[in-house]
Image: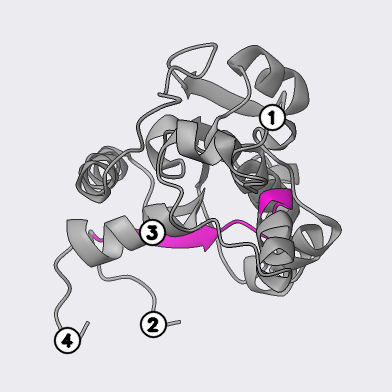
Amino acid sequence: SMGKPKAAKLIHWVRHGQGYHNLMAEACQQLGVDFSELGTYEEAKKATFHPYVNDAIKDPPLTCLGVDDAKALWSLAKTLTPELLVVSPLRRATETILIAFKDAVSNGVPVLAHGACREQIGVHTCDRRSSRTDYVETFPKVDVSHVKHDEDPTSWTQRESKLELAQRAHDFLLWLLQRPETEIVVGTHSAFLMGLFHIALEISDDS
């Protein structure tokens, strides 16, 4: 609401709405299924059920509640004037921004998918993206020039560390700072945001 100082960038960070993996995790918690300590892919696959390591939950879309989460941003989105919309190439994040900022998209604001702002990678099936080919078919208006590979090259067996995630978030922030736009929306994920604001950035108490 205070606007941005001269020569500064205004970045609006948006965490995606509820995805089906979130819904499955909530159901497990309500049923008393503890999956928090299943750290490796092999351990998780041996479990009776793991909501994040399940072949049916690869790159899950938004639930009906998740769509409503995105629609709830309409009134706020109308008050913003982004020049660029950057999204994680995971479906739930892309869908959230395309729904929340539908007017901006209709008015020609470009949408760009960037692999560096995706969720913490490795092990979890829900955090494996669709192929770039399928993504383009689903989201034809999104620029995928910053999605490097067609198939997701991330590891099935090793989870990205918090430090590695924070380094990735730091590098992504440097990329944002080099962009010519001064007001940008980024659609991303909770772990990415925690890595960015808790580790990669130094924020003073009066910020």
Q: CA distance from mark 4 to mark 3?
A: 18 Å
Indicate the secondary structure of the residue bearing disc 3.
Answer: helix
Residue at 65%, 35% (x, y): give it.
59
Asked whether the beta carbons under mark 4 and mark 3 sit within 8 Å of each other, the answer is no
- Residue span colored magenta: 8-21
What amino acid type should be assigned to the residue bearing mark 1?
A: Asp
On the image, the x and y values in percent for residue 205 come to 17, 86
Name the residue carrying label 1: 55
Circle nearer the N terminus (4, 3): 3
**Residue type (three-letter) at the residue carrying disc 4:** Asp
Crowding near the residue tagged with mark 4, few <14, some 14–19, many ≥20 C-alpha atoms within 10 Å:
few
Residue marked by disc 3: 193
Q: CA distance from mark 4 to mark 2?
A: 18 Å
Looking at the image, tell me whether mark 3 or mark 1 is earlier in sequence order: 1
Tell me if residue 14 is in the magenta stretch.
yes
Tell me how the rendering is colored. Answer: one colour
How far apart marks 3 and 1 lie (CA) works out to 26 Å
Along the polypeptide, which appears first: circle 4 or circle 2? 2
* Mark 2 lies on residue: 2
